[in-house]
Amino acid sequence: MRRLLIALATVTLVIGIAFAGVGELLSQRTSIQVGPPPAELHARSFTLHDRVSDSISGWLSRGTPGAGAILLLHGIRADRRQMLERAKFLARAGYSVMLIDLPGHGESGGERITFGYREAEGVRAAMHYMTEMLPGERTAVIGVSLGAASFVLSKVSPAPDAAVLESMFPTLEEAVADRLELHAGPMASMFTPLLLWQLPIRLGFSADALRPIAELPTLHCPVLIASGAEDRHTKLPETKRLFESAGQPKELWVVGGAAHEDLHDYNPGEYEARVSAFLRKYLRHAG
């Protein structure tokens, strides 16, 4: 019995150390020099400051006056270049577009990735800057995964005139459990608390602060919620729960065959047609 207890204690310690290491890796910021915007986007680079991450870096491309302005928000461990193809098709349609690196990513400041908590501050700063630079324009947000969650958690006021939320997790608990299950098998989700307990120690907040599904009902703008039918990072029942919690008007787009991936890259033609129709409805008409 004594040897068994020692063995169990040893295994528990090893598992705890392993998950502490995973938590460290997952929250490490991604620093990369993004460089100048591509010439075809006709954008200029900018850096603005907020009280949390010290700086937000991005690109701003001015479109046809009155056509509308759209903020593009990338996913975790990426940067603004992930949204470049979306920016190009929106710019061709006449929209002004802003692409930023979320806090903890790319060329923006921030010591850690915080899974939407401090990234939300960056979203608020970017929305304020976009409306300041493009006064009078109707606005929209397109966010992917972490970008979508960061926007919803930002509770930006006033709300934009429309939002496209792609592959967004409903709660951080479910996001962690889904990923553990995907990479280590169905029983691995039982270890979710070993990652989540680190949040207050490492980042200064708990998982309760990262529940986009709880904030969706207070997002007073039309939403298009999109996700891949084969997404195992955010499962289809979770996406449907998000849709049910959102206020009207709302649309749900389940992309057949797509996993947790770039939905524009998966089917550019269908993506552009679907998103363009949604944006025209609320940015260029009364809605």
Image (cartoon, rainbow, N blue to C red):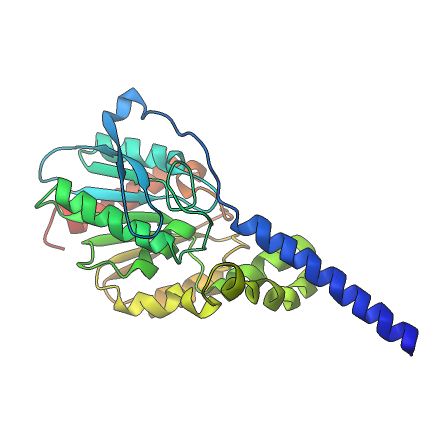
17 or 232, which is in the foreground?
17
**Location of residue 99 in the rendering, given as x and y in whole percent from the top left corner:** 30, 38
Instruction: Tell me the quarter of the image containing the C terminus.
Output: bottom left
The reply to whether residue 254 is in sight is no
Q: Position of residue 34 (x, y in %)?
A: 40, 30
* Residue for point 40% across, 56% down: 116
Q: Quadrant of residue 97?
A: top left
Q: Quadrant of the N terminus?
A: bottom right
Residue 268 at x, y = what percent? 38, 36
Q: Is residue 275 above or below residue 153?
A: above
Give the farthest residue toward the bottom: 1
Visible in this render: residue 191? Answer: yes
**From the viewer's perspective, is residue 160 above or below residue 81?**
below
Q: Position of residue 188 (x, y in %)?
A: 67, 62
Q: Nearer the viewer, residue 278 or 189?
A: 189
Residue visible at 75% across and 64% down? Answer: 13
